[in-house]
Protein backbone atom coordinates (compact mmCIF):
# COMPACT_ATOMS: atom_id res chain seq x y z
CA UNK A 1 0.00 0.00 0.00
CA UNK A 2 1.41 3.40 -0.90
CA UNK A 3 0.93 6.68 0.94
CA UNK A 4 -1.95 7.81 -1.28
CA UNK A 5 -4.06 4.75 -0.42
CA UNK A 6 -3.16 4.46 3.27
CA UNK A 7 -6.09 4.95 5.61
CA UNK A 8 -5.89 6.52 9.01
CA UNK A 9 -6.75 4.07 11.76
CA UNK A 10 -8.65 5.39 14.75
CA UNK A 11 -8.83 3.91 18.24
CA UNK A 12 -12.02 2.22 19.31
CA UNK A 13 -12.68 3.15 22.94
CA UNK A 14 -14.82 0.78 24.95
CA UNK A 15 -18.54 1.50 24.70
CA UNK A 16 -20.09 1.66 28.17
CA UNK A 17 -23.69 0.58 28.69
CA UNK A 18 -26.12 -1.46 26.64
CA UNK A 19 -28.11 1.41 25.12
CA UNK A 20 -26.19 4.43 23.89
CA UNK A 21 -27.63 7.87 23.20
CA UNK A 22 -26.23 9.43 20.03
CA UNK A 23 -27.10 13.12 19.88
CA UNK A 24 -26.92 15.35 16.83
CA UNK A 25 -26.37 18.88 18.06
CA UNK A 26 -25.51 22.22 16.50
CA UNK A 27 -21.89 22.46 17.62
CA UNK A 28 -20.75 19.01 18.77
CA UNK A 29 -17.26 20.17 19.80
CA UNK A 30 -18.75 22.98 21.91
CA UNK A 31 -21.35 20.58 23.35
CA UNK A 32 -18.62 18.10 24.34
CA UNK A 33 -16.70 20.88 26.08
CA UNK A 34 -19.88 21.98 27.84
CA UNK A 35 -20.68 18.40 28.95
CA UNK A 36 -17.18 18.16 30.44
CA UNK A 37 -17.93 21.20 32.61
CA UNK A 38 -21.58 20.44 33.36
CA UNK A 39 -21.55 16.67 33.80
CA UNK A 40 -17.91 15.71 34.31
CA UNK A 41 -17.74 14.07 30.88
CA UNK A 42 -14.51 12.48 29.73
CA UNK A 43 -13.80 12.66 26.00
CA UNK A 44 -12.43 9.29 24.87
CA UNK A 45 -12.47 9.86 21.12
CA UNK A 46 -13.34 12.43 18.48
CA UNK A 47 -12.85 12.80 14.77
CA UNK A 48 -11.11 16.05 13.85
CA UNK A 49 -13.46 18.85 12.85
CA UNK A 50 -13.83 19.68 9.16
CA UNK A 51 -13.10 23.11 7.67
CA UNK A 52 -16.51 24.32 8.94
CA UNK A 53 -15.76 23.19 12.51
CA UNK A 54 -18.13 20.20 12.35
CA UNK A 55 -17.28 16.72 13.52
CA UNK A 56 -18.94 13.48 12.56
CA UNK A 57 -18.28 11.76 15.90
CA UNK A 58 -17.37 12.43 19.52
CA UNK A 59 -17.46 9.69 22.17
CA UNK A 60 -17.84 10.74 25.82
CA UNK A 61 -18.09 8.89 29.10
CA UNK A 62 -20.59 10.36 31.56
CA UNK A 63 -21.58 8.74 34.85
CA UNK A 64 -20.39 5.28 33.77
CA UNK A 65 -22.07 5.38 30.34
CA UNK A 66 -21.16 6.34 26.80
CA UNK A 67 -22.71 9.35 25.08
CA UNK A 68 -21.99 10.04 21.43
CA UNK A 69 -22.34 13.32 19.56
CA UNK A 70 -22.16 14.60 16.02
CA UNK A 71 -22.90 17.74 14.09
CA UNK A 72 -25.53 17.99 11.39
CA UNK A 73 -24.39 17.40 7.81
CA UNK A 74 -27.31 18.60 5.64
CA UNK A 75 -25.34 18.02 2.44
CA UNK A 76 -25.37 14.30 3.32
CA UNK A 77 -29.08 14.17 4.20
CA UNK A 78 -28.70 14.92 7.91
CA UNK A 79 -30.01 18.44 8.57
CA UNK A 80 -30.05 19.84 12.09
CA UNK A 81 -33.30 19.33 14.01
CA UNK A 82 -33.98 20.80 17.43
CA UNK A 83 -33.89 18.36 20.34
CA UNK A 84 -37.38 17.26 21.32
CA UNK A 85 -39.29 14.35 22.77
CA UNK A 86 -36.55 12.85 24.96
CA UNK A 87 -34.66 13.44 28.20
CA UNK A 88 -31.18 12.32 29.14
CA UNK A 89 -31.63 10.77 32.61
CA UNK A 90 -28.69 10.69 35.04
CA UNK A 91 -29.22 8.14 37.81
CA UNK A 92 -27.13 9.24 40.77
CA UNK A 93 -26.58 8.40 44.40
CA UNK A 94 -28.28 10.18 47.28
CA UNK A 95 -24.85 11.39 48.38
CA UNK A 96 -23.92 13.13 45.10
CA UNK A 97 -27.04 14.46 43.35
CA UNK A 98 -26.66 17.93 44.91
CA UNK A 99 -23.07 18.32 43.65
CA UNK A 100 -24.01 17.07 40.15
CA UNK A 101 -26.97 19.49 40.09
CA UNK A 102 -24.88 22.46 41.23
CA UNK A 103 -22.12 21.74 38.69
CA UNK A 104 -24.65 21.57 35.82
CA UNK A 105 -26.41 24.78 36.85
CA UNK A 106 -23.11 26.60 37.42
CA UNK A 107 -21.95 25.50 33.94
CA UNK A 108 -25.02 27.04 32.32
CA UNK A 109 -27.90 24.55 32.37
CA UNK A 110 -31.31 26.16 32.81
CA UNK A 111 -33.50 24.72 35.57
CA UNK A 112 -36.82 23.47 34.26
CA UNK A 113 -37.97 21.56 37.37
CA UNK A 114 -36.02 22.13 40.61
CA UNK A 115 -34.73 19.16 42.56
CA UNK A 116 -37.56 17.93 44.77
CA UNK A 117 -38.82 14.85 46.54
CA UNK A 118 -41.11 13.07 44.11
CA UNK A 119 -44.14 10.85 44.66
CA UNK A 120 -42.14 7.75 43.71
CA UNK A 121 -39.77 8.36 46.61
CA UNK A 122 -36.68 9.80 44.87
CA UNK A 123 -35.21 13.27 44.45
CA UNK A 124 -35.62 14.39 40.85
CA UNK A 125 -35.18 17.56 38.82
CA UNK A 126 -34.75 18.54 35.19
CA UNK A 127 -32.57 20.96 33.24
CA UNK A 128 -32.06 22.18 29.68
CA UNK A 129 -28.55 22.63 28.32
CA UNK A 130 -27.53 25.45 25.94
CA UNK A 131 -27.89 23.02 22.99
CA UNK A 132 -31.59 22.42 23.73
CA UNK A 133 -31.14 18.94 25.24
CA UNK A 134 -33.22 18.07 28.32
CA UNK A 135 -31.41 16.41 31.22
CA UNK A 136 -32.90 14.99 34.41
CA UNK A 137 -31.24 13.83 37.59
CA UNK A 138 -32.71 11.17 39.82
CA UNK A 139 -31.47 9.73 43.12
CA UNK A 140 -32.94 7.78 46.02
CA UNK A 141 -33.69 9.77 49.12
CA UNK A 142 -31.26 8.93 51.93
Image: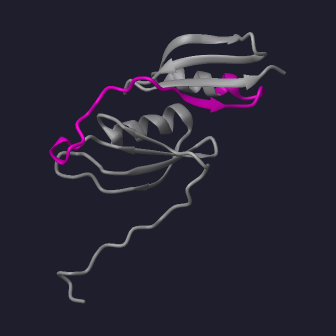
Residue 82 in percent (x, y) is at 32, 26
Q: Quadrant of the C terminus?
A: top right
Q: Quadrant of the N terminus?
A: bottom left
Q: Please give left or right for residue 50 compared with residue 22 in the image.
A: left
Q: Please give left or right for residue 124 compared with residue 59 in the image.
A: right
Residue 28 in percent (x, y) is at 34, 41
Q: Residue sitting at 23 percent across and 45 percent down? A: 53
Compared to residue 15, the image places residue 136 above or below, namely: above
The image quadrant that residue 97 belongs to is top right
Compared to residue 74, the image places residue 43 above or below, namely: below
The image quadrant that residue 100 belongs to is top right
Q: Please give left or right for residue 9 compared with residue 94 in the image.
A: left
**Relative to the observer, which residue lies in front, 85 or 59?**
85
Compared to residue 83, the image places residue 2 above or below, namely: below
Q: How many marks?
A: 0
Compared to residue 43, the image places residue 135 above or below, namely: above
Is residue 136 within the magenta segment?
Answer: no
Residue 11 in percent (x, y) is at 45, 67
Q: Residue sitting at 30 percent across and 37 percent down? A: 27
Query: What's the magenta region?
Result: 73-99
Q: Residue furthest right?
A: 142
**Relative to the observer, which residue lies in front, 95 or 122?**
122
Q: Please give left or right for residue 121 compared with residue 112 in the image.
A: right
The secondary structure that most of the magenta stretch takes on is loop
**Relative to the observer, which residue lies in front, 34 or 140?**
140
Color scheme of the displayed model:
one colour
Residue 85 in percent (x, y) is at 44, 23
Is residue 91 within the magenta segment?
Answer: yes
Q: Residue sitting at 48 percent across and 65 percent down? A: 12
Amino acid sequence: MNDTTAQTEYPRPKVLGGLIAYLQVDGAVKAADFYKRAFGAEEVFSYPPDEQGRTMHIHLYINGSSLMLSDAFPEHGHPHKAAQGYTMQLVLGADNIESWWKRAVDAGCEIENPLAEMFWGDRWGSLRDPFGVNWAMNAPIK
